[in-house]
Amino acid sequence: MRFKSQKIAFWFFAVCMLLLILQVTYGFIMGFARIGMDGLHDFIPFNAARATHTNLLVVWLLTGFMGAAYYIIPEEADRELHMPQLAWVQLISWVVVGVIAIVGFHFNWWEGRKFLEIPRPLDYLVVVNVLLFLYLIGMTIWNAKKHSTTQLVLFFGLFCAALLYLPGMIYFDNQTLDSYFRWWVVHLWVEGVWELIMGAILAFLLIKLTGVDREVVEKWLYVIVGLTFLSGILGTGHHYYWIGTPKYWLMVGGIFSALEPLAFLGMALWAINMYRKKGKDHPNKLALYWTLGCAIMSFVGAGFLGFAHTWPQVNKWTHGTLITAMHGHMAFWGAYGMLVFAVIAYALPQLTGRKLFNNLSGYLAFWSANIGMVGMTGALAVAGITQVYLERKLGLDFLAAQKETEVHFIGMMLAALLFTFGVILFIYDFIRHGKPNDEAIVAATSAE
Ligand code: HEM
Ligand code: HEM
Ligand SMILES: [Fe+2]
């Protein structure tokens, strides 16, 4: 750490871990409901648990991105954060809005639009909060002496993510139009502008961890941004197949979305190559594990598993089934979950001055979380194939087919236990680092 104001990142990361634990808890509530143990139904029905699980996911990831920005931007801009006290106001108000939203879901205060369930009045508060966030990091960059590509791509990604929240706030009384614009948020986030955030954070980590020249690392960042826009924007069409839009989307969506894995493949090859070129051995191997792991797992979860069901010929069978949930878990974890873990693994020793990186619990956390997630994905894949076959090939009733997948959910939850064990170990290490402190500040040359 080089600047006092970077310490705020620690508190964003801490909130992020808390929300993750809560998300996993709701995952288990749904998992139990899926195997017929739905004792909590009267208080937390499946729809409330699902909305809570997925919204908490988005909120902990965004909290992680914000923490990452508060850590990375001052370092890249080479100056203290602009008005750091306001970052506290932003964190606290962010948490308050999040808590109100989650509590609201349990009292049926929600919009039944997957991932965008947060009611409209709260959306306005989210907008104000995010504007404050953008103002703080924007002004830090504005007043900076240098403007690195990494910080500009990070800011642009965060700015576009905020902008793309707005189409989800327009009111339509037409189902097709509502669905059409919902994807501008959901798809253009994860398969568009969040990839810019991912590229920028990976670039920052690769520069620090491999010692490869900034020019080389950043040159490839342009390629990633290019590939993302080329494929991701029209790739939105893979959500327009069956919602009442014109037929040409079958072709446009199919072709462009099939190109999307290239951006993720690009990121994986980029990270591996930078690692192979490395000019120095950074002592924080764990951060490197999470960084490379993120680049590789995102290719498998988003690129490979996304590709598997993106063709209209396949998607007409798998649409909206557990195949989607299979892909959703590994893509979100591989790309964005692991990205946040990578930043935390890198930043914690820097923020606290405690170099707890090469310990057994850290490696165990990495392997059990990832093997657990591969297991969860595998169980959901089998459940999904079973569902497609029984429900859509044999014509079994929806609930009758779901009943047959109970056994797979037992497997899924066993794997989820392993995953959760990894997450808990990671948090155990997090806590052992203690709080951030000013003694951890080091001069520019030794900060890496
Ligand atoms: C990190 C990037 C990605 C994440 C986090 C992600 C996550 C998700 C999630 C959560 C859904 C369900 C959305 C909903 O129904 O509301 C979904 C759907 C889908 N994703 Fe991805 N995805 C990613 C990348 C990709 C890529 C690169 C492809 C294609 C190559 C792809 C193909 C699809 C398809 C076809 C669907 C629709 C499934 C259906 O019809 O039910 N995804 N994705
Ligand atoms: C570890 C314990 C977890 C369990 C037991 C669990 C379980 C579940 C269940 C049962 C569903 C609902 C599937 C359905 O519609 O029937 C679900 C949805 C979802 N979960 Fe999890 N989950 C866990 C962790 C996670 C994590 C760590 C992530 C992301 C990093 C995640 C991302 C998602 C997403 C994106 C969906 C929505 C998928 C879709 O749109 O179809 N979950 N989860
Ligand atoms: Fe998509």
Image (tube, rainbow, N blue to C red):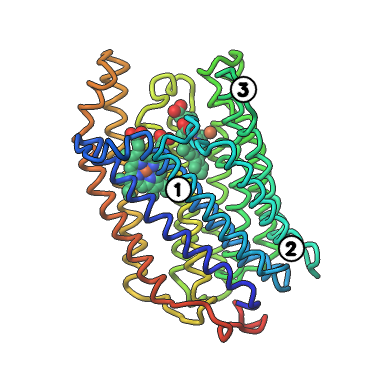
Picture quadrant where residue 387 is located? top left
Sequence-wise first label, 3 or 1: 1
Residue 272 seen by the camera: yes
Q: CA distance from mark 3 to mark 2?
A: 41 Å
Sequence-wise first label, 3 or 2: 2
Q: Position of residue 231 (x, y in %)?
A: 62, 35
Q: CA distance from mark 2 to mark 1?
A: 32 Å
Q: Residues within 10 Å of mark 2 (few under 14, many from 20)?
A: some
Label 1 CB-ligand 2 distance < 8 A: no
Q: Label 3, on which residue?
A: 172
Secondary structure of the residue carrying numbered label 2: loop
Secondary structure of the residue carrying numbered label 1: helix
Q: Position of residue 350 (x, y in %)?
A: 54, 76
Residue beneath the point at 68% across and 45% down: 160
Q: CA distance from mark 3 to mark 1?
A: 25 Å
Q: Position of residue 188 (x, y in %)?
A: 60, 37
Q: Residues within 10 Å of mark 1 (few under 14, many from 20)?
A: many
Residue 255 vs residue 111, the one in the foreground: 111
46 left or right, relative to 302: left
- For badge 3, the amino acid type reads Phe
Q: Label 1, on which residue?
A: 56
- For badge 1, the amino acid type reads Leu
Secondary structure of the residue carrying numbered label 3: loop
Q: Is residue 440 above or below residue 101?
A: below
Q: Label 2, on which residue?
A: 148
- Indicate the quadrant containing the N terminus: top left, top right, bottom left or bottom right: bottom right
Mark 2 and 1 residues: CB-CB less than 8 Å, in contact? Answer: no
